[in-house]
Image (tube, rainbow, N blue to C red):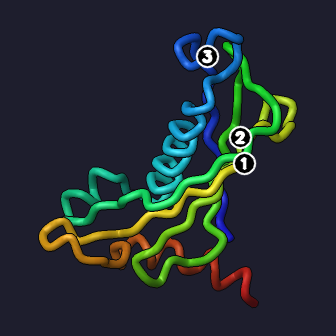
């Protein structure tokens, strides 16, 4: 398993009439975490798109536990529990308060697709090469 953390301060526009983060915005938090996860390995979604690869969300879940509010500093903990060896990539996300309390937990399943023919593909080998050692260490 490999995990990254991304910190975000909740903006006013992300809250609803009740003063808490609108439920749909947690998916944007998950996306921010995924983007930073990929960036930590020297890649970006834009890099993958330039290589002709697209990542499509095919399934998403979120469990809401406690509310986040305007100006809270939250941490999005993003994990891959296993090395993606086929087209399917599963990211797990936890949103934590500044005090470390779990606010929400989710899972996003993506398919890696070849943009030219819209067929399933794998993540770029250079990206997988950088990920692989983190998973080999946990298996020893």
1 and 2 marks in contact (CB < 8 Å):
yes
Rendered position, 14 above or below 4 = above
In this view, the mark in front (2 or 3): 3
Q: Residue at x 52, y 73 (%)?
A: 131
Name the N-terminal-most of marks 1 and 2.
2
Q: Which residue is mark 1?
A: 105
Name the N-terminal-most of marks 2 and 3.
3
Residue 73 x, y percent position in the rendering: 70, 24
Residue 47 x, y percent position in the rendering: 27, 56
Q: Which residue is mark 2?
A: 95
Whether residue 4 is visible to the viewer of this picture, yes or no, is no
Q: Which residue is mark 3?
A: 15
Q: CA distance from mark 2 to mark 3?
A: 15 Å
Q: Residue at x 66, y 42 (%)?
A: 76
Front position in the image: 48 or 40: 48
Residue 5 x, y percent position in the rendering: 65, 46
Q: Residue at x 36, y 59 (%)?
A: 56
Whether residue 98 is visible to the viewer of this picture, yes or no, is yes
């Amino acid at each position: 398993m490999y995990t990254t953390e991304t910190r975000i301060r909740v903006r006013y526009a992300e809250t609803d009439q009740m003063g808490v983060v609108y439920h749909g915005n947690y998916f944007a938090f998950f996306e921010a975490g995924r983007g930073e996860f990929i960036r930590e390995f020297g890649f970006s979604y834009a890099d993958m798109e330039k290589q002709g690869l697209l990542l499509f969300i095919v399934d998403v879940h979120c469990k809401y536990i406690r509310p986040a509010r305007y100006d809270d500093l939250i941490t999005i903990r993003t994990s891959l529990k296993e090395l993606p060896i086929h087209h399917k990539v599963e990211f797990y996300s936890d949103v934590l308060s500044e005090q470390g309390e779990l606010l929400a937990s989710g899972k996003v399943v993506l398919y890696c697709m070849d943009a030219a023919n819209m067929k399933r593909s794998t993540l770029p080998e250079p990206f997988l090469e950088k990920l692989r050692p983190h998973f080999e260490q946990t298996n020893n």
